[in-house]
Image (tube, grey):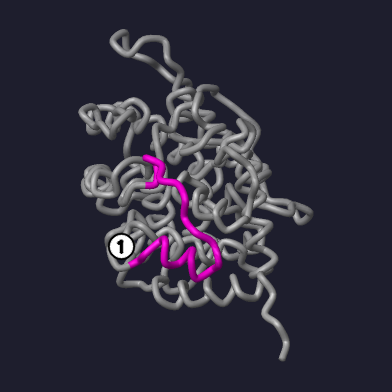
């Protein structure tokens, strides 16, 4: 009788977990659920970027505040096409999601608006920065974030070759001399910073993968290039499983874990992300029981892994460590 290898055993457990929890009916309590409100890909990708950018803190608070942003828009693509910076600043002046205020949100929305003006869609912008030789999405993600955050200058080169039409940023005296680029960057983490880029990689998972949970639409980017959206909860589980030996949930750890999953699912290394993230969130999903079935025992309990919590404050100081955005 042929003995089961550790990789085969882990794959079997992960497939069971995937079959049990990778279900459409579980999406409605997740920020991902907002994407299924929109049939138009242009609306869906904007909703996805807003929802993923605010995906830090308690899930209930995330959903409440994403709703607050999206509800007035109706169709997000058309809304942003018509809106001016003054319109957005006024509409979202009172917005607050933990450490994110109206200024940061307005800068993000203006970045989306400008990218759509230059490229036609967020998808076109991202794919324009993706090269055939790229092993992962990270080089394209860095270029994508740079374009979204670069709303200060009157003109910057377009990745897709089009002429840039970016208006200079203006700041009211009450806001101080904070550039629009800096405000947008507060919500947009980049691989250039060494951040695990949990929220941006989460957005890419939603847009690139297509199954019962992830709606897809950007399949051309290639699911095999995706990087795991790593937060402290997932990091703790993956470290217990021996998928990384690193001590911080940074970009290197995310790449380690992605490579480990690639040995199990070469064409779709982050396939199990949604199912694993249900462990410790759903009452019936026992984390310790899962780990024990994989031959390991859970030994630690960290604040970042509490039920319903995704990550901590997405500031530059914490991007290289555990719980970063």
Q: Nearer the viewer, residue 287 or 71?
A: 287
Above/below status of 197 relative to 87: below
Residue 4: where, in percent of width, then height?
67, 80
Q: Nearer the viewer, residue 27 or 277?
A: 277
Above/below status of 94 relative to 206: above
Q: Residue furthest bottom?
A: 1
Residue 244: where, in percent of width, then height?
64, 50
Q: Residue furthest right?
A: 133
Start and end of the magenta stretch? Answer: 285-305
Horizontal side of residue 269 vs 47, given as left or right:
right
State the residue at coordinates (54%, 23%): 154
State the residue at coordinates (70%, 82%): 3
Q: Secondary structure at mark 1?
A: loop
Residue 53: where, in percent of width, then height?
41, 42
**Would residue 215 be seen by someone viewing this image from the given angle?**
no
Verify whether residue 292 appears in magenta: yes
């Amino acid at each position: 009788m042929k003995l089961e290898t550790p990789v085969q055993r882990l794959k079997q457990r992960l497939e069971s977990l995937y079959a049990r929890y990778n279900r459409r009916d579980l999406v409605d309590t997740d920020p991902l659920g907002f994407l299924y409100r929109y049939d138009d890909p242009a609306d869906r990708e904007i909703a996805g970027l807003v929802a993923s950018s605010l995906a830090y803190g308690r899930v209930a608070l995330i959903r409440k505040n994403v709703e607050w942003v999206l509800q007035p828009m109706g169709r997000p693509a058309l809304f942003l096409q018509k809106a001016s910076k003054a319109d957005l600043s006024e509409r979202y002046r009172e917005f607050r999601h933990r450490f994110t205020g109206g200024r940061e949100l307005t800068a993000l929305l203006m970045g989306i608006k400008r990218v759509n003006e230059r490229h036609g869609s967020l998808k076109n912008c991202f794919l324009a920065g993706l090269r055939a030789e790229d092993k992962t999405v990270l080089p394209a993600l860095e270029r994508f974030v740079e374009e979204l955050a670069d709303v200060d200058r009157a003109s910057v080169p377009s990745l897709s070759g089009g002429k840039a039409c970016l208006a200079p940023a203006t700041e009211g005296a009450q806001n101080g001399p904070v550039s629009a680029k800096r405000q947008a960057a507060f919500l947009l983490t980049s691989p250039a910073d060494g951040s695990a880029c949990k929220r941006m990689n989460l957005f890419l998972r939603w847009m690139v993968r297509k199954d019962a949970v992830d709606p897809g639409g950007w399949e051309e980017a290639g699911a095999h290039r995706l990087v795991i959206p790593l937060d402290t909860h997932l990091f703790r589980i993956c470290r217990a499983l021996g998928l990384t030996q690193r001590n911080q949930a940074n970009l290197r750890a995310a790449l380690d874990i992605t490579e480990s999953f690639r040995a199990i699912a070469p064409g779709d290394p982050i396939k199990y992300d949604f199912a694993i993230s249900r462990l410790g969130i759903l009452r019936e999903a026992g984390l310790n029981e899962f780990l024990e079935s994989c031959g390991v025992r859970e030994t630690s309990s960290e604040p970042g892994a509490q039920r319903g919590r995704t990550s901590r404050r997405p500031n530059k100081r914490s991007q290289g460590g555990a719980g970063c955005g």
